Image (spheres, rainbow, N blue to C red):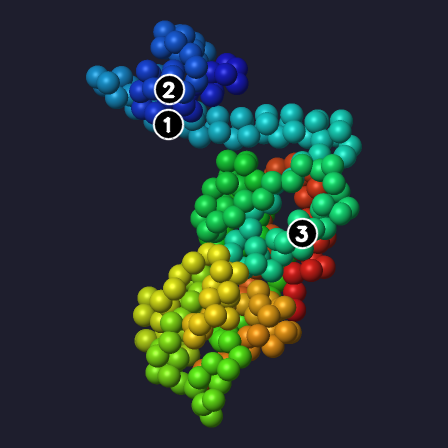
Amino acid sequence: MNLNQLRHLIALAEHHSFSKAAEALFLTQPALSRSIQALEQDLDVRLVDRDGKRTTLTAYGELVAARAERILFEARELKRGVELLKEGQLGALSVGFGPTPAAVLMQPFLTHMASHYPRMQLKIARGSVELLVQSLRNESVDIIAVDRRALLTADDLAIGPVATLRGGFLCRSGHPLTALAQIDLAALRQYPVASTPLSDELARLLVEQLGPDAHPARLVTLDSEDINSLLDLVEATDTVFFGIFACARARIAAGRVCEIHVQPHFERFGQYALVTLARRSMSPAVEVFRAFFAENFGE
């Protein structure tokens, strides 16, 4: 048994076809067949069932493929750990940002890295929590900063630390809502409401606090992961933003946008976490990002 044979079995499990798996592996189909047969002989069990054009794994094949994923991960980590030890330097870093962490932290972090680590190779990824977790699992990013409440806990993820930020409703200075003595949900819904995709938990809290019409499916009319574009829209129109205040810190300080209280008013908080792949060897560059997050991602 060798690592290549395990890779071949995993490809076969993914493609359900010797021809397609061979093409993905840049092998001939006979070479792939010989590799799988050698693995079956070594283990003395049948790993695949060939049913016409479609190939499926036997129960033994499913077991071996699952174990093979872990073995190949550990092999990659062994090589990565040795390379990091040999380098003894920052090397490269790939960071994934969810919408709010991107709005709060991405530009300051890029400035920090360009000023203090100009030779380090830095890659930035943005997207939904689901997309970033998948990028983490396929090892195309080293660490991600995302909404903790939208993250499903899993054994292969290391989560922490968690930072809490205050949030709520923002509008432009001089917005008609600011002239009201009291703003209720009916008044708010007279205007477009912009937000990022919201977690199920936050949707439930909004309904509990403000009623059924506060569910994002009814309340939010402009949904985008690009928070800065939404905030530009808030400044230019009567659109109201629902999200984390730190995303608009400079705009609030300059008096261009302001917080409004929708009755009944509750303090609302977002929770954001750093997530890495459990048991993966971390480069020193990851610790640079962790330290920057701890110092700069907060009220």
Left or right: 63 as drawn, with respect to 95 = left
Q: Amino acid at mark 2?
A: Ala
Q: Residue furthest front?
A: 236
Q: Earlier in the sequence, mark 1 or mark 2?
A: 1
The crowding category of the residue bearing disc 1, from other C-alpha atoms within 10 Å (few below 14, some 14 to 19, many at least 20), is few
Who's the residue at 31% across and 20% down the image? 17
Q: Amino acid at mark 1?
A: Glu
The crowding category of the residue bearing disc 3, from other C-alpha atoms within 10 Å (few below 14, some 14 to 19, many at least 20), is some
Q: Are marks 1 and 2 in contact (CB under 8 Å)?
A: yes
Report the front residue among 201 and 229.
Answer: 229
Image quarter for residue 142?
top right
Q: Amino acid at mark 3?
A: Phe
Q: Earlier in the sequence, mark 3 or mark 1?
A: 1
**Residue labelled with disc 2:** 21
Report the front residue among 258 and 70.
Answer: 258
Image quarter for residue 214?
bottom left
Image quarter for residue 162?
bottom right
**Residue labelled with disc 1:** 14
Who's the residue at 34% across and 19% down the image? 20
**Residue labelled with disc 3:** 109
Report the front residue among 230 and 211.
Answer: 230
